[in-house]
């Protein structure tokens, strides 16, 4: 195999790994949103202009989390669902920190993202 072929193969492997991580991050966020009571609906193609993908955003009296790339869906909830979401996230972070301490990891935040603290769920 020539050097350029190796570089191309390594780049493709790295990119596919990144895509898998982003897909899992989105799934983690969507799982906890569903658990908090957010309702899942199909994302309408004509409304894709003004969205912030994979980010919980406030729109009047409700909150949306749009995923145009993986599930092509929107999770929508109100203040009650947001409160449950915050409680679930706090509970998961505490559980993760206890587990990290139990196995001897010094700083729980050093372990990166995961289902205990999925990305995009801080309201913007």
Image (cartoon, rainbow, N blue to C red):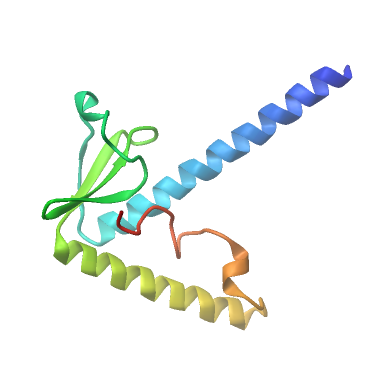
Q: Quadrant of residue 80?
A: bottom left
Instruction: Please provide percent x and percent y for residue 8.
Output: 74, 22
Instruction: Please provide percent x and percent y for residue 41.
Output: 19, 39
Give the quarter of the figure containing the C terminus: bottom left
Instruction: Please provide percent x and percent y for residue 35.
Output: 27, 60
Tell me how many marks there are: 0
Q: Which residue is drawn at 19% across and 62% down?
A: 81
Q: In which quarter of the image is residue 66?
A: top left
Q: Residue at x 53, y 58 (%)?
A: 113
Seen in the image, is 33 located left or right of residue 17? left
Question: Hey, which residue is sitting farthest left in the picture?
Answer: 61
Q: Residue at x 66, y 76 (%)?
A: 105
Instruction: Please provide percent x and percent y for residue 58.
Output: 21, 52
Q: Which residue is drawn at 46% across and 49% down?
A: 25
Is residue 15 placed above or below 101 in the rendered structure? Answer: above
Of residues 122 and 98, the one drawn nearer to the viewer in this rendering? 122
Of residues 40 and 58, the one drawn nearer to the viewer in this rendering? 58
Seen in the image, is 14 located left or right of residue 28? right
């Amino acid at each position: 195999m020539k050097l350029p072929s190796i570089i191309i193969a390594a780049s493709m492997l790295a990119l596919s790994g990144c895509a898998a991580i982003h897909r899992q991050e989105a799934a983690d966020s969507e799982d906890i949103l569903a658990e908090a009571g957010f309702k899942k609906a199909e994302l309408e193609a004509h409304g894709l202009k003004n969205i912030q993908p994979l980010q919980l955003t406030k729109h009047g009296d409700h909150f949306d989390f749009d995923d145009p790339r993986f599930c092509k869906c929107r999770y929508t909830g109100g203040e009650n669902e947001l409160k449950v979401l915050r409680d679930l996230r706090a509970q998961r972070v505490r559980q993760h920190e206890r587990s990290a301490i139990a196995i001897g990891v010094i700083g729980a935040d050093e372990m990166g993202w995961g289902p205990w603290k999925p990305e995009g769920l801080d309201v913007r």
